[in-house]
Amino acid sequence: MSMLFRWLIFGFAALLFNFPLLSTLLTSLKSEGEIVSNPSIIIQSPTLANYVKIFEMADRFDILHFLWNSLVISALGAFFALLLAFPAAYVIVRTGFGRNWLLPFVLNLRALPLIIFAIPLYMMFQAVGLLDTLLGLALIMCIINLPLTLALLSSTLRNIPEELDDAARIDGASTISIILRIILPLSVAAIASSSVLGFVYAWNEFLFGLMLTTKSATPITVGASFFFSASGGGVKWGVASAVIMLSLLPPLIVGLLFYRSIGSSLTGGAVKG
Amino acid sequence: MQVSSKEKFWLTAPITFFLLVMLGFPLLLDLIYSVSEVTFENLLAPRLQGFENYFETLQDPTYWDALAFSLKFGLTASLVQLFLALFLAIYLEPLLARHPWLMAVLMAPMMVAPALIGLMYRLILHEFVGVIPYYLWEWVGDSPAFLGTENAFLTVVTIEILQWTPFALLILYTAYRSIPSHLREAARMDGANSLQLLMLVELPYMMPVILLTFFIRFIDSFRVFDNIYVLVGSGAGGTSTSLSIYIYKAFFRGGNIGQAVAASVLLFLAALLLIALLERFSRRMETT
């Protein structure tokens, strides 16, 4: 009996939290005519026409271009963060060097609203030609991802026994080869979950995408919002919903596939950060 | 220790250099521009002029409105999220423990960009084609202007809460699950009932994580930008201008660089203060 109530509460919460997603999905499957005549949650004649229409209007609204931008930016952003954080995490954990300045500084970035740096970054990007480039945005995503990536890596490395390093060193291995041959293979799980989280965070970023791009490097979150203003006259709600659904799919799929590791890393990172 | 100091340097140099260039230098620029007379024309040669920009920002009623909005938004959103998530985490624990995949269903909104959620609500709340106004007309015979001056705050704060309660839920659920079972057993032995167990054992045990969750959610909600920006812009009469939106607008729309930068520096100082508090708090948690 009490389990039944729990199911009810769960169902209610799940519906409430996911309501915008479900409602947008339903709208995207309605014809433009039905949307106007029937805003309810019942679809009279489901259709995929809206999804087809997105690709027919590629000359005005090139969704594949925006999706590609987001893919590159998010993948690079996650990769850069790993590249910078991994050697630093090794030094911090094994030698204590940077434990009192680098580690807390990076972890506290989580609490700093990055808009503080947005205006000077805009000027710097303009000066060096990074404005409206994929590389420029990927560098920003790297800043965003660093705190969690470093937190995850250093807590993982802390659990790798130091005896492994020592044994390799006796065999004459250099620090670099210890990192690459011993530590790296043992941190695959942490690398995977920071990549997933970094990818999701970067994909969902909006503010810097809005400020630092105009056209060629625009990510999908910003591109989708263009659609609302660019469709001329009234917004085509059906197509707009289909655009939103396609835009949210990649991080949603990745996130749900790895939801277990996301859960534990997010709590781990949050509790440490 | 056999990592040489040269190696220590070279292995941490990339991240340090990156942080200096991407955050250190921008902060320096922020500080310089904030005490300069600066326009888009003289960006490379700003004229120092003292604290004029700060005075102007601090005398701007819109700035104070934005600050008040962000504080109110951050506090409301984080507190509601916290209580909602705490209830769900504890009440649903037996269910979620038996069927872990249910958590994935609750986590889905966390994977979606806040900007896209904002766009979704533009449709959902639309007075003619939106599903919520439709059902309100059907059932109640009336539908409020969700994004009008009176309701904008309530609308956007609700959207924020519904998207991010899962985040708090996830952290609190994990914390609740990690309470050692011997604590519960000992309390039961002493004759504690469920309510006493919750109030005297479980909640105190979870308190550090509860406070931390509150901090994280407050910070994230305080700096809100995406969903409000796509949903209402700055709102009817600027009623939903958060501090982030204020800075963005001062710079991009108003071309008021000095004021935007001064507001950024003030925000930086406030964030530092909060971080210092957090550090002190977490240190105290570690020692107790």
Image (cartoon, coloured by chain):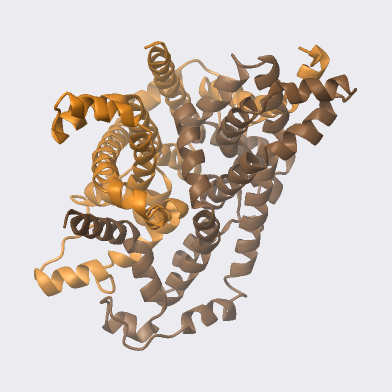
Q: Can residue A71 be seen in this view?
A: yes
Please say if A25 is above or below B259. below
Q: Which residue lies furthest to the right in this view?
A: A172
Of B282 and A121, the residue lying toward us: B282
In the current view of this chain or complex, which residue is farthest to the left?
B140
A6 displayed left or right of B283: left
The picture places residue A51, in percent across and down from the top left corner, at 51, 78
Chain shown in orange: B
Q: Quadrant of residue B115?
A: bottom left
Q: Quadrant of the N terminus of chain A?
A: bottom left
Query: Does any portion of residue A273 appear in the rendered image?
Result: no
Q: In this view, does A196 lie to the left or right of B18?
A: left
Viewer-closest of B177 and A70: B177
Q: In which quarter of the image is residue A220?
A: bottom right
Q: Where is residue A82 in the image (x, y as percent from the top left)?
A: 68, 38
> In screen coordinates, is B188 left or right of B163?
left
Report x, y in % for residue A48. 47, 83
Residue at position x 34%, y 67% in the image:
B123
In-front residue for pair A58/A258: A258
Number of numbered discs overlaid on the protein picture: 0
Residue at the limit of the structure toward the front, as seen here? B189
Which x, y percent locates residue A52? 54, 82
Q: Which residue is drawn at 45% across and 55% down?
A: B112
Relative placement, left or right, of A80 versus B36 is: right
Q: Is residue B33 above or below residue B276?
A: below
Colour given to chain A in the rendered image: brown
